[in-house]
Image (spheres, helix red, strand yellow):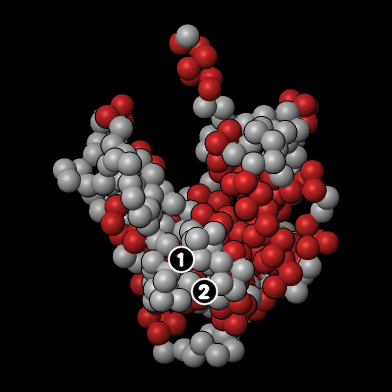
Amino acid sequence: MGVRAIAVVLTVALVANLAGLGLGTGYGEKEIKVKTVKGQKVCTQGWECSWWSKYCCNQTISDIFQVYQFEDLFAKRNSPVAHAVGFWDYQSFITAAALFEPLGFGTTGGKIMQMKEIAAFLAHVGAKTSCGYGVATGGPLAWGLCYNHEMSPDGDYCDDNYKYTYPCAPGAQYYGRGALPVYWNYNYGAVGEAIKVDLLHHPEYLEQNATLAFQAAIWRWLTPIKKSQPSAHDIFVGNWKPTKNDTLAKRGPTFGSTMNILYGDYLCGKGDIDPMNTIVSHYLYYLDLLGIGREQAGPHDELTCAEQVAFNPTVAASTASS
């Protein structure tokens, strides 16, 4: 995939381009270029949608999601009691997102779908990095991006079963880090390969560089766990068509199924458990804050994965060996 090969170069270029631009009303004018390739209209939009794509013919993320909205969603992230004060910001998010907008991230469909996807992705991020249930001033949903790493790791998360593909680096610890926290050496290895950063030897980069942390999270949102399965992005924007087996497993093109593909039976198929409901609550709250309104989210059974069978059940291996 082209984005992998040019990710680091583009990140450096984007940071340089954005450094001199103000944060008040956006990052300035973008020149839209249009051409036709094999009968299809494709576009670029300067720094933000920088290679030819049909998705770059739509509004870009910075057109519809600006600094003040990011601040509204993550209002308490720089409070004194937060654990990543000064780390997360809009510029880091938009710099990371710009690498993936030509692939359809936040640029698929019309404005409503685009904003719903931004809200959905950030709802996962907000819920997974929140400290709101310990410090609820301002409401428990206002505390997303409170963390950038796991505070009390249970271990070093080194799995020697992957010693030939993703061997653990001496002294490295692979505890949860990032916007959608990455755990285990094999996940750091896979994400690092994709975004062309040596996370296997330097997992700490995800708690040192917010742009990389967002980049890793967006890559996961856009990337299937298995080739035969959809990504969370494809599920959410309607690129994926469920099979008969998916329908029987109560999986559909819904927000609930994005939780299924990202977390499997850690969250799904267990009824209305709190960790799942927390993510749903963040999504509805973010839709309201963005002016879309939670009524656009759909019925409750599409928001949850309470009764869904996991795409990748963790019990399969233990059942087979018992």
Residue at the far left in the pictured view: 170
Give residue 159's quadrant in the image: top left
Residue 198, label in figure: none
Closest to the observer: 253 or 6?
253
Residue located 66% across and 32% down the image: 269
Relative horizontal placement of residue 158, taking residue 176 as reference (left or right):
left
Residue 257 lies, in percent from the top left, at 68, 42
Residue located 78% across and 57% down the image: 297
* Pointer 1 local density, CA inside 10 Å: few below 14, some 14–19, many at least 20: many
* Pointer 2 local density, CA inside 10 Å: few below 14, some 14–19, many at least 20: many
Closest to the observer: 204 or 38?
204
Is residue 172 in view from this perspective?
Answer: yes
Mark 1 or mark 2, earlier in chain: 2
Residue 54 lies, in percent from the top left, at 66, 63
Q: Identity of the amino acid at label 2?
A: Lys
Is residue 45 in view from this perspective?
Answer: no
Instruction: Give the labeled residue for mark 2.
Output: 76
Identify the secondary structure beneath mark 2: loop
Closest to the observer: 272 or 137?
137
Tags 1 and 2 touching, CB below 8 Å: yes
Residue at the far top in the pictured view: 322
Q: Identity of the amino acid at label 1?
A: Cys
For the residues marked 1 and 2, what is the alpha-carbon distance in whole angstroms? 7 Å
Residue located 65% across and 63% down the image: 119
Residue 131 lies, in percent from the top left, at 49, 61
Relative horizontal placement of residue 223, taking residue 7 as reference (left or right):
right
Residue located 68% across and 53% down the image: 280
Instruction: Give the labeled residue for mark 1.
Output: 146
